[in-house]
Image (cartoon, rainbow, N blue to C red):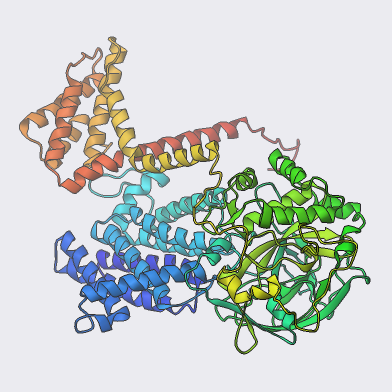
Amino acid sequence: MSGRVRLAIGAAVATMMAACALLPLVSPVTWILQAGLLVTVQAAVGAVTRRVPLARSLTVAAQALVSLMLLTLVFAREHALFGLVPGPDTFRYFADLLQQGSDDVSRFAIPAPLSDGIRLMLVGGVLVIGLIVDVLAVTFRSAAPAGLPLLALYSIAAGLSDGGTDWLWFLVAAAGYLMLLLAEGQERLSQWGRVFGGAARSADGPASGTVAPVRTGRRIGMVALGVALVVPLALPAMRGGLLDGTGTGVGAGNGNGGTISAVNPLVSLRDSLNVDEDRQVLSLKGSSNTVSNLYLRIVSLDDFDGTTWKPSQRHIIGVPDRFPTPAGLSQAVRRSEVRTRITAADWYAQDWLPMPYPPSDVQVSGKWRYEPVGMTLVGDHGQNTRGAEYEVTSLDVQPTAEQLASAPEPSEALRREYTKVPKSLPSVVAKTAEQVTEGATSHYEEAVKLQDYFAVTGGFQYDTEVQIGRGADAIATFLEKKQGFCVHFSFAMAAMARTLGIPARVAVGFAPGTTQSDGSVAVGLKDAHAWPELYFEGVGWTRFEPTPTRGTAPEYTQSDTPGTSLPDVTRPSQQASEAPSATASPTESCTAQMRKLEACDSPSAQAVVTGGGDGPKWWQSALWAVGGLVVLVLPFSPLLWRKRLRAVRLGGHARTEEGAAAHTLAAWQELTDTAWDFGILPDESQTPRRAAARIVRLGRLDPAAGAAVHRVADALEQVLYAPRPQPTAGLAEDVRRVTGALGSTVSRGTRLRALFAPRSAVRVLWAVSAWSAALRARAAARRPTLRKPFGQES
């Protein structure tokens, strides 16, 4: 088997091993077999065209054309001539499929279903990466740069996944890259040998002591793996969002212990609200009309760091047969049981189980764990809601305004945990809270005034397009612009409540869905919602609704007296009468379907202007600028280093014997390094005169350039052997003349490589290796030697 064929096989295998990092993103994973087959055909076409042989450009064109025909055959044969030859209709169909795939990626959880659009993105992307790797490693015989597209393929997968098994897929991708390097053959690896093995390479073959190619490849791989395993530790990880099931599970053990880590479930909430197609997530059926107004709670966020809210790390246990009474709920508060049967869509993979709050019993199959503080269920080791059917018994807690207004202060421990606000929170947040609640006589009145400020009196506008913003000033920016969606409203009200001493947290889940003709309730992506929960002793965690045009305001916060926003606390909140009312109440007239269409009357009109967050801080912008500069400069660092070194070597020198000698040595070093850059390997075993003759012969230099080479060599011999060497003028000009002559006798590719990837740049690694060895030697010399006791045998 020829070296080119082995290299082509190595390129194909390396591509597929890197593509394995995409496997956790979709289900099922059968696409990898299809991609592997197409990459194999693509590599075979390249091997055949190179054997003909064809020009490099024709080889690449043939592979690209065959790849396009393969994609046409697999995905768009109904839209192509003879099912194989693509035409305008084929490209339009590809564009539609890619758009569909892009939409599916934005709306589906991980692992997403393998739709045609996603499959085209995966298979087509792997095929493109495979073509780039094959062109670099095989067609242009440069396997090392082929690691960049492989790294890009791995990085895309690592950025989208949860990060739990990224190290495993990295090892697979790195192993494929090492196989590609080893397949490049003895010739290229032997040139790298001195870097890691310390031996030089002669013109006619490996010098004695040259490290074997396989061992050199292993050393290269060890260094590459070490660097690549350390670098990701400094990179930020990307986590899933509200609808992004990570699929990795939480906790550990047998179901009797473990913890939930603090994963922020708000990343994709806005994307869920802005989808074009409101896909159904859950279907609810219940025995009463209450199910049409149910909020489904996924998780509560109680850790506020000034920038965002997230769930605290909590201890989880096995699911109890019967849930305990919610914390703080007394027997005096009226309640009723609601039984709801919930069915999740087969594409919706959520780690947390959506349930009405507070739940008292749940019947669900699979591996689930219970978090007692938030009263939530979380999947264990990959368990999620995909296609789940479960039944939840929950409490419909119906407190009165009087009970809430007369609630005593909660325990000191609860206040300490749920009223914490960071010092970084802008002072305008607490100041606004005090102004809005001025005149309130209880925490309950303060909470109602805050809710009405956001939903009714404050002039806020609901806008799902507004940017979330980052940093501690995000809430202050929202209070100033008065535009946002449920995340902004719930975050702001909870933070302001905490500044007033009211225990508060944020709940994430779904607002009431749409009642169907069969009596069931459909909950869609656009029903994704966040709302604040405030704690009142005797009632427990209580829902409020500050977001205008979303959900329903709780009855215990609605006004009973015209002209005031506060309920009359002197009498209990009125319950709905059994007899039909002559006129529909605002809640009854605004059906769930009307709420979904945002057709209900509201003092706050929906905004259409896009707002912005507070943006990145100056130091973040500076870091991004420095990072971008490094990325741009790094590929040109060998070029810049060689230009700088050449200028130093051929520059001015001291007008002394020592200065002239140093200048002569530097000129000869520059001459031999330049010849090395153009493909003439240095041979340190030869005399200067024979080395000069070799450069003239291999470089096919003209007589003038050849004479310049010999003048530099003669000057070097003077410095090395003459008792009193005579300084030679014009050495720098001679080296520049030889450089131009060498460049005129080689191909354009060789000139470009000599410019951007000079072989002599390896001297930097040699210098670092020598410095490291000297440092180790000095450290060993300073280490005290242990003497054996007198009389002990050696």
From the viewer's perspective, tell me whether residue 637 is left or right of residue 543: left
Is residue 31 toward the left or the right of residue 669 in the image?
A: right
Q: Is residue 265 above or below residue 85?
A: above
The spot of residue 342 in percent (x, y) is 67, 82
Q: Nearest the camera: 180 or 698?
A: 180
- The reply, left or right, for residue 406 in relation to residue 535 is right
Nearer the observer, 721 or 764: 764
Question: Which residue occupies the extreme top position in the image?
Answer: 656
Q: Is residue 431 left or right of residue 233?
A: right
Name the image quarter holding residue 670.
top left
Q: Is residue 304 above or below residue 89?
A: above
> x and y percent of residue 296 in the render?
69, 72
Q: Which part of the image, by quadrant, shows the N terminus?
A: bottom left
Front-lying residue, 199 or 646: 646
Quarter location, residue 518 = bottom right
Residue 156 falls in which quadrant of the image? bottom left
